[in-house]
Each structure stands twice: as C-alpha cells, then as structure tokens.
Amino acid sequence: MLATSFLTVLKKLEPILYAPSHFHTNYHSLPLNYLLNSCSSLSDLKRIHALIVTNGSLKNLLLSTKLITLARSVSPTMDYARKLFDLMPERDLFLWNTMIRGYADLGPCQEAIVLYRDMHRIGLLPDSYTFPSVVRSCAVLSALMEGREVHCNIIKNGFDLDVFVQSSLITMYSQSGEIFNSELVFGEMVVRNIMIAFGTQLNAITLVSILPACAGLEFLNLGKLVHGCAVKLGVDSDISLINTLIALYGKCGIVDTARSLFDQMPVRSLVSWNAMIAAYGQTNADRFAIKLFRRMLIEKVEFDYITMVSIISACANLGALNTGKWIHKLVRNKGLETNVSITNALIDMYAKCGNIDLARDAFNKLPHKSVVSWTSIIGACASHGHGDDALKLFTKMKEEGIRPNSFTFISVLTACRHSGLVEEGKKHFESMTKDYSIGPAVEHCACMVDLLGRAGQLVEAYEFIKNMPSGPDIGVWGALLGACRIHGNLELAELVADRLHQLESQTVSFYVLMTNIYAEAGRWEDVARLRKLMEERELKKIPGHSLVEVNQRFHTFLSGSKSRPF
C-alpha cells in the first residue's frame, strides 16, 4: 500500500503531472523530482516510474539516475534497478557506478564485475568510485585472478594512491591469503597517508579511510593510535568512525572493546549492528551473534544480506539447524533468497548441520551460480561422503564455463579422500597446476597426503611430502601420522613424530595419537614417557563437548557432565 504522505503529494501534483506532453521536459521533471524525494517503498517507485514513462521524461538523465538510485535503496535486490538501467537510452559514469556499487552491496557480486567489464568494452573509463566496489566484489567471490586484473587497471588509470581503493585492495588480498601483496599495498599507503594527514587537519573521514588497513593483529597498535587521535580530536562520536573501529577490533579478536563501543553509541545504524555481529562471528562467539540479532529484530532494525550471511554462518558453526531454518524463512520473507552470498551461506549451513538435501535444494534454486556456490555444494557433498556426486558437480561446473579456484580444488580433493578415489585425486591435483595455473597450497598437499595415507600408500605419501615445493606444516605431518596409526606403521610414525617435534608442535592431539600408536604396539615404556612429557609441558587434552539446540536456545555439555539445564 502506498504511504499516505506519498498519496497526498501525488494528488497535489496531478494537474502538472498529467499536463499535455508539449510542455517542456524540465517543467515536468520538477514535480517528479519532488515525488521521488517523497518515495519510501518499491510500490511508490513503480508508480513514479509509470508517470515518468507516461509524460516522456525517461530521457531526463537526472530523473532516471535518481530513479535507479532509489530502486537500489528501497528494494532488497537489484532486479528492478537492473530493468531500469537496461531501459536507459543514455548512461553516464555516475549511473554505472551506482549499479556496480548496488551489486557489490546487495549481490550477486559477479554482476558488478560484468558491468565493470561492459564499461571497458564501450570505452567508459572507471574512476575512484568504481574501483572499490569492483575490488570488494572480487573479494566476496574469492576471484583473485579478476582482482589482480582490476589492480592492474587501477595502476594504469592512476588510482593506486587513492586511500579507499588501497583499503579495498588490502581487504581483497588479505581474504585471499595473499598476505605479501596485502602488506605491499599497506606499506605504500599507511605511512604516506598518515604523514599527509598530520600535515593537514585530521578529521573523521581521514581516520575512517585509514582504519580498514589496520585490521590485523600486526597492525593493531596502529589502529589504537588512530583511535586515540579520534578521541583527542573529539570526533570519536562520529557514527562511521565507530562502525569502522568496531570492525577493526572485531577482526583483531578484541570483541569486548568492540562491544563497549557498540553499547556506548547513542544512535546505531544497520552498519553498526552488522559490524558487531560480524565481530562475534570472527571470534567464534556465534551464540552472542545470534543473541544480538534477536535484539536487533526486537528493536525493529531492518536487516540486509550482510546481516543474514553473518547469522547463517553462526548457525553453521553451531550446527543449529532449527535456528538456521528460521533464518532461512526470514530470508524468504524479505525476498533475499536469490542473493548469491546468502544462498552460498545456506548451502554451507545445511551441510554442516547434516542436511545435505536442503543444501542441494538451496543450490538448485539459485538462478546465478558463482564459483563460490559451486565450491560450497561440492564441499557439502564431499563432507557427507558423496564423493561421486561431488565430482559430477565439478564436471558440470566446468561444462557451464565456471573456472574453479583454489578453494574448489580443496573441496574436490576432499571428495576424493573421503571416498578413497586415489587416481581421481592424483588427476585433479595435477590438473590444478597444469590446466588452471593454481599452485598447490599446504591445504591441497594435506589432502593428498591424507588421500594416499588412507589408501595405505604410506611410502608414497612420505615421498610426496619430501617433494613438496613449500615446507610441510604440522597439518601435513599430522595427516601422515594418522595414517600410520590406521595401518600400524610404527617406524614411519616415529619418523613423523620427530618431524613434528622439530616444528615445535604443542598440539595435544599428536601426543595422544603417538601414545595410542605405542600402546597398540605394546611399547608401554614409551607410553609412560610421552605421558610424563605431556605433564611436564602442561599439555592437557581438551574434554569433548556437545552442543544441543532446544527451542532455539543452546546448551553445551562437557564430557562426563551430569548437568541437566532442561
């Protein structure tokens, strides 16, 4: 239903709106512009759109731009804005940026990249407002290759020193595991910008632009320095600055400070709620994230797709299927089910909660499937032991022209190791480098060692480790140690244990595993020696625990506990 205020304005302007079409276009645009300022819903917007078409004002670039901008803000998806954009006879750079940012904010992010490439194709040069949204989209999609391509264009177009562009690049490289490149951009940015800032008048906008680059324990002190500057300058009540500080402390794991800032805010925006919920998610405080989301609903704060992705991920980590289904219902009611980021999170959540059928259903309903979508469903099938299904999906993904990334191959190799498909695993491991130029990371190598080890090919697994391009970590050696126990190879187990000792591993599970290997071999003196060593190093096995969800409340039980909370 249209808002009463909107109807009142519309009635007053009807004589002008329905005047003969020979009146000048600018004359018509004045009341339409006034109507657009009064618009607060999609139904209002559609009515104004009809009026614009009726009186021939669609060619008015200012009106059309405002129409699309509003379509992005009043609708949970970009569908209507895209229809308007495609009908536009003329599009300027601002309009392209509006659409690209809309897709970066609301999804699907791959559309932001498609539009960016369309801009290049028609010869329209991007600016400093284009690049942050495109880079952010690459980060969300884990599209590192496309991100590097965009980075090259950033340098080519002279925006490599823009602080907002640099911040987005740092985020993208960090999320993709490219720490060296992230630090490289950071090094170019922070010292230069802080020196410039101290040479001029610091303000909240300057500080907000610097803070995202400080997200990481190695840069925490710099972040605290910027926070201190904000307090001294008296701009620490700026809502954008507080939101950025909450995000900073959350990423650094200092969630109590983040919550303190959140609680002290006199007014909170949606970004504030999202930042705090994300902070809980990043510190594995998933129950607190869900609790805060419930409070958000009680206070009638409208959520968006960013909120939903964080909360669905929290449900996944907790294995909270009932709460996850409730969240899915909220998503459906809000019209966000076609959002690719949300659906990817739903696939992961249902898989981790043990319901592969609902994960498949969410995937099948997605109209535009990204590489992340395919990777999620392949990983879901792999984790549930459906190796053949996972590999069939991988084949279908390639047939549809979706290029797999590093994470896709981790899921594929996981499918192979869970199903004992040794030759398939070897084939895909080689294809990763040969066909897609993806260098094997430690995670890929750990999968291969586990695959060979489970199949009893322990010597081949050991030779594989020795030939790794980068040094094996404790995860790789741990996979081989587990295989040694399964197949009773004590000699190789002792060699692996020695390698783990050289890496100074204090992982309790490896000591326990080696103790069990000695016990099964009847080497009781070595069992006693290892247990004494664990006592000396104060290494204790963490008790197992279970989490039970009852009426959307969570209860944790430690091993041996007799508590009965319900």
Image: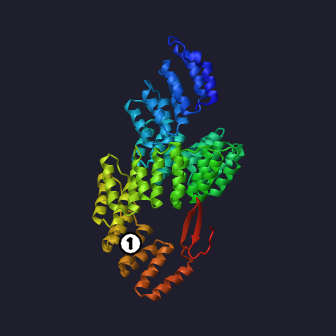
Place of residue 175 in the rendered image (x, y in percent of width and height, measured from the top left): 48, 52
Judging depth in this view, the residue of 19 and 485 nearest the camera is 19
Q: Residues within 10 Å of mark 1 (few under 14, many from 20)?
A: many
Above or below, comparing residue 147 to residue 122 in the picture = below
- Amino acid type at circle 1 is Leu
Rendered-image quadrant of the C terminus:
bottom right
Judging depth in this view, the residue of 7 and 422 nearest the camera is 7
Above or below, comparing residue 22 to residue 351 in the picture = above
Rendered-image quadrant of the N terminus:
top right
Place of residue 474 in the rendered image (x, y in percent of width and height, measured from the top left): 44, 69
Q: Residue at x 57, y 72 (%)?
A: 558
Q: Residue at x 45, y 46 (%)?
A: 340
Place of residue 212 in the rendered image (x, y in percent of width and height, measured from the top left): 57, 47
Image-based side of 228 in relation to 402, left or right: right
Q: Is residue 139 visible?
A: no
**Secondary structure at numbered mark 1:** helix
Place of residue 74 in the rendered image (x, y in percent of width and height, measured from the top left): 55, 35
Q: Is residue 246 visible?
A: yes
Above or below, comparing residue 558 to residue 88 in the picture = below
Q: Residue at x 39, y 63 (%)?
A: 470
Judging depth in this view, the residue of 166 and 76 nearest the camera is 76
The image quadrant of residue 430 is: bottom left
Residue for badge 1:
480
